[in-house]
Amino acid sequence: METLNAISENLQKGKANAVKELVQTALEKGLSAENILNGGLLSGMDIIGAKFKNNEIYIPEVMIAARAMNAGMEILRPVLGSSGVKARGKIVIGTVKGDLHDIGKNLVKMMMDGKGIDVIDLGTDVSAERFIAAAVENDARIIACSALLTTTMPEMKKVVELLEERGLRDSITVMIGGAPVTESYRQSIGADIYTPDAASAAEEAAKVLG
Ligand code: B1M
């Protein structure tokens, strides 16, 4: 508990090296990767989110905290990745065009890695065109789109529309997620799967890939 609090506090201060070391210590103490992720990293990021919302902190502080979060996630990645079952097929993942938020997307990728899924990460600011080009090039069966801004969510609709235009709609599953995304939004744009968190995204992807 003490270590988890220290992870959360150091993340909020943006101390990436300390977060890395503490995550390592927590693993050595026998805490599970899920516990460290939820009780340390994500709980720190929740506090950052609330302070950002209330204008108590600003973008630079949030970016530094995000960097510390990603540093901690790097240490967890191999551990979360070790329990996987090999799944067939590939996934193309990215944060949609105009959107630079990548922490949730990285988490989804990490959980999918953990299921033994071959994930091609296109990064952030990914246009519908790029998602589809990468899926075709890599013979991917799923396109996974993350969006954190209400203003960038419509890019997900473009992915669905462009797949239809190209005659690829039936061969590629479109998964969507991110804080403002909902099941009713999924229905409204005709995407295939919405999941509220990274773990369920990985589970659903593994089901699709068989
Ligand atoms: Co931004 N930001 N931000 N931000 N930021 C939010 C999203 C915001 C809610 C803050 C607020 O006002 N309360 C708000 C959006 C409002 C809205 O549209 N409704 C906002 C804003 C407005 C902005 C800017 C416009 C601010 C500005 O410039 N004035 C700007 C936009 C930049 C851009 O993208 N073009 C901006 C910038 C930034 C930073 C760069 C400073 C930084 C991002 C750093 C980075 O990602 N590398 C940042 C951050 C960190 C946040 C908050 C604080 C935290 C987001 C986060 O990483 N959460 C956020 C406030 C908040 O959410 N409380 C906020 C942790 C992460 C694990 O959660 O990504 O939701 P999340 O992922 C979850 C699920 O959603 C799900 O899995 C994860 C959990 O398991 N999930 C998926 C995510 N993707 C999925 C895909 C799936 C399935 C599940 O399937 C494919």
Image (tube, rainbow, N blue to C red):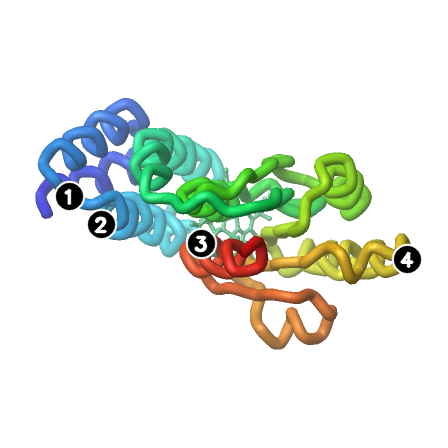
Q: Note whether ligand 1 is within 8 Å of mark 3.
A: yes
**Helix, strand or loop for disc 3:** helix
Residue located beneath label 4 in the image = 165
**Could you tell me residue 90's position as x and y percent?**
61, 43
Identify the residue at image location x=44%, y=60%: 200
> Counting residues from the N terminus, which is met first, the one under dot 3 or under dot 2?
2
Viewer-side residue, 45 vs 86: 86
Residue 124: which quarter of the image? top right
Residue located beneath label 1 in the image = 31
Instruction: Using the numbered discs, state the Cα–Cα distance from disc 4 to disc 1 in whole angstroms.
Output: 49 Å
Would you say 194 lies left or right of 32 here?
A: right
Would you say 126 lies left or right of 114 here?
A: right
**Helix, strand or loop for disc 1:** loop
Residue located beneath label 2 in the image = 35
Would you say 28 lies left or right of 96 here?
A: left
> Counting residues from the N terminus, which is met first, the one under dot 4 or under dot 1?
1
Q: Amino acid at mark 1?
A: Leu
**Helix, strand or loop for disc 4:** helix
Viewer-side residue, 11 vs 57: 11
> Counting residues from the N terminus, which is met first, the one under dot 2 or under dot 4?
2
> Counting residues from the N terminus, which is met first, the one under dot 3 or under dot 4?
4
Q: Amino acid at mark 3?
A: Ala
